[in-house]
Image (tube, rainbow, N blue to C red):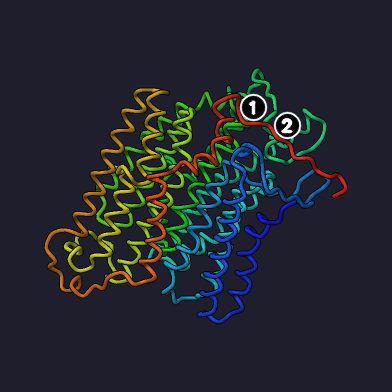
């Protein structure tokens, strides 16, 4: 039994305790050091992960929790969770570095980031359905605090809205969890909380409640919770407020990692537990994804606030991911998984740059900028580079994911593919509009003439992001290979059913 995943989950929490007890300056170093240690563990995971066995859980860790009901503290990683764990561990030190100038309640601020690290990593690694729910809910608490305590002027409103909408979805998910948990006991005569044990459940589609069969209600309960987190149109209303009010580090983690908890949940729960219901509702989800692609792009184009523009661009980008999942063929599903990572890198970098600009100018209004390429050329270089990635320019990461999603979408439904292409075009329009407003034109403002370029810390973080943006754009094969076996089980015979053997003496 490996303890690698256990360390990846628990190390940030241990560091959070030390952060609360340490002086403020030292707490930043502890947070950064522990996040870099987590990144090192992720590198070990990458090197030792067996791509040929990606359909099965690896590095399993199992400990007793509520043995009477076979509920365990179980961790494992497969090809579905593997890229998201790497993304989570990579973005955490970036977010902490972006928050280096934070001066308000620094110890608690860094502790919240580390607790969020534990929760996000645990969500992707949990093999027990109740443990998944605990980590899922745990992630909400530090993010609400990050927005509500360290955010901008309307932070309390944004935090409460974020909490209420997300928690409402979580309650629906809890109902679905207990439903499938009891269904397993009724069908097999014993309890099991291991997520993959529910993949083999058989459902009576003739037994209906208010016109829908049991698996359809279960699907809807799970799907609503996950679609709120994604967030899929029209459940997205909390996102622009949360992003606009959150501090830079919070926005980076929210966009790069937390939103992917929703898309991961659809693939981990909705598709394999209720496959027939997924096929019934997939066209409707795809339609909402397409509406989100166009709506997010259109509203982004209308924004005067640069940060809100990027927030609405996320609504558009996650629509592509949902579209790829609903198409459910090799090209689209591979593209969706890649795009989860690509969006995290590109949008995380955009929020990093917007935060750096806000620290210097104390404004995010497009009307306050113009001509900055002359004053801060390195900032301009990275903004153009990352925007090109977000637009899906060939040679950068965004192109690979979007191309595969569109290819798979055309194979599934030509209309889906055509609307997706419009979304790509609109993305170029609003991103070029933003670049024009921020970087080009006359440098007329006296305040803009005093701006300083990126410092070494900011340039280092953006360079690290840039390496992976180029790598995934030029040579994504190593990442695809490590996901392939796990994804193949979805478009072939359905997700592989694997039940971990549990020692009853635990």
Locate residue 196: give its quadrant.
top right
Direction from residue 180 to residue 240 in the image, left or right: left
Give the mark, 2 or 1, whose residue is nearer the N terminus: 2
* Residue 87 image point, x, y percent: 50, 52
Q: Which residue is mark 2?
A: 183
Residue 190: give x, y in percent of width and height: 82, 35
Residue drawn at 41 percent across, 49 percent down = 471
Residue bearing mark 1: 214
> Above or below — where is 291 with respect to 148?
above
Relative vertical location of residue 179 with respect to residue 472 in this rendering, above or below: above
Of residues 489 and 348, which is closer to you in this image?
Answer: 489
- Residue 210 is situated, as x and y percent measured from the top left of the image, at 59, 25
**Element under label 2?**
helix
In terms of depth relative to the viewer, which is nearer, 435 or 102?
435
Q: Are marks 2 and 1 in contact (CB under 8 Å)?
A: yes
Along the viewing direction, whichever of 162 and 26 lies nearer the viewer: 26
Looking at the image, residue 262 lies above or below residue 103? above
For residue 25, side relative to residue 154 (left or right): right
Left or right of 70? Residue 451 is: left
Residue at left offset 44%, top offset 31%? 331
* Disc 2 crowd, CA 10 A, few/some/many (<14, 14-19, 20+): some
Looking at the image, which residue is at 62% across and 28% down? Answer: 215
């Amino acid at each position: 039994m490996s303890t690698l995943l256990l360390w990846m989950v628990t190390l940030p929490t241990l560091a959070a305790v030390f952060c609360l007890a340490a002086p403020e300056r030292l707490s930043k170093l502890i947070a950064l050091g522990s996040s870099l240690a987590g990144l090192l563990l992720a590198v070990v995971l990458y090197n030792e992960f067996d791509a040929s066995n990606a359909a099965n859980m690896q590095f399993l860790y199992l400990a007793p929790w509520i043995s009477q009901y076979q509920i365990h503290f179980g961790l494992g990683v497969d090809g579905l969770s593997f890229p998201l764990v790497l993304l989570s561990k990579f973005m955490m030190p970036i977010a902490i570095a972006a928050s280096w100038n934070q001066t308000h309640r620094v110890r608690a601020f860094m502790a919240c980031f580390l607790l969020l690290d534990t929760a996000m990593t645990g969500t992707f690694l949990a093999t027990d359905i109740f443990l998944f729910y605990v980590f899922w809910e745990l992630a909400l608490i530090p993010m609400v605090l990050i927005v509500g305590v360290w955010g901008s002027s309307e932070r309390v409103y944004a935090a409460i809205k974020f909490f209420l909408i997300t928690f409402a979805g979580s309650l629906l998910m809890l109902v679905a969890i207990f439903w499938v948990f009891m269904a397993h006991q009724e069908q097999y005569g014993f309890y099991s909380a291991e997520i993959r044990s529910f993949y083999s459940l058989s459902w009576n589609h003739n037994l209906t409640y208010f016109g829908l069969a049991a698996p359809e209600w279960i699907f809807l309960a799970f799907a609503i919770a996950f679609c709120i987190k994604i967030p899929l149109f029209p459940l997205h209303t909390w996102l622009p407020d949360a992003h606009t009010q959150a501090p830079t580090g919070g926005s980076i983690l929210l966009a790069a990692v937390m939103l992917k908890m929703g898309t991961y949940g659809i693939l981990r729960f909705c598709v394999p537990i209720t496959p027939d219901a997924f096929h019934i509702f997939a066209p409707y989800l795809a339609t909402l994804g397409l509406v989100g692609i166009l709506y997010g792009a259109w509203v982004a184009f209308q924004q005067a606030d640069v940060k809100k523009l990027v927030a609405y661009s996320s609504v558009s980008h996650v629509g592509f991911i949902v579209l790829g999942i609903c198409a459910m063929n090799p090209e689209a599903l591979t593209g969706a998984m890649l795009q989860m990572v690509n969006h995290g890198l590109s949008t995380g970098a955009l929020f990093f740059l917007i935060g750096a600009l806000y620290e210097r100018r104390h404004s995010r209004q497009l009307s306050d900028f113009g001509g900055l390429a002359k004053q801060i050329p390195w900032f301009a270089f990275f903004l153009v580079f990352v925007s090109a990635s977000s637009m899906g320019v060939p040679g950068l990461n965004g192109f690979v994911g979007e191309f595969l999603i569109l290819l798979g979408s055309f194979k599934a439904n030509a209309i889906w593919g055509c609307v997706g292409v419009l979304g790509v075009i609109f993305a170029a329009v609003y991103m070029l509009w933003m670049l024009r407003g921020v970087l080009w034109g006359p440098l007329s403002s006296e305040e803009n003439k005093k701006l300083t370029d990126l410092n070494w810390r900011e340039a280092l973080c953006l360079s690290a992001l840039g390496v992976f943006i180029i790598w995934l754009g030029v040579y994504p094969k190593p990442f695809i290979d490590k996901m392939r076996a796990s994804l193949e089980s979805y478009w072939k015979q359905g997700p592989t059913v694997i039940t971990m053997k549990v020692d009853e003496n635990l």
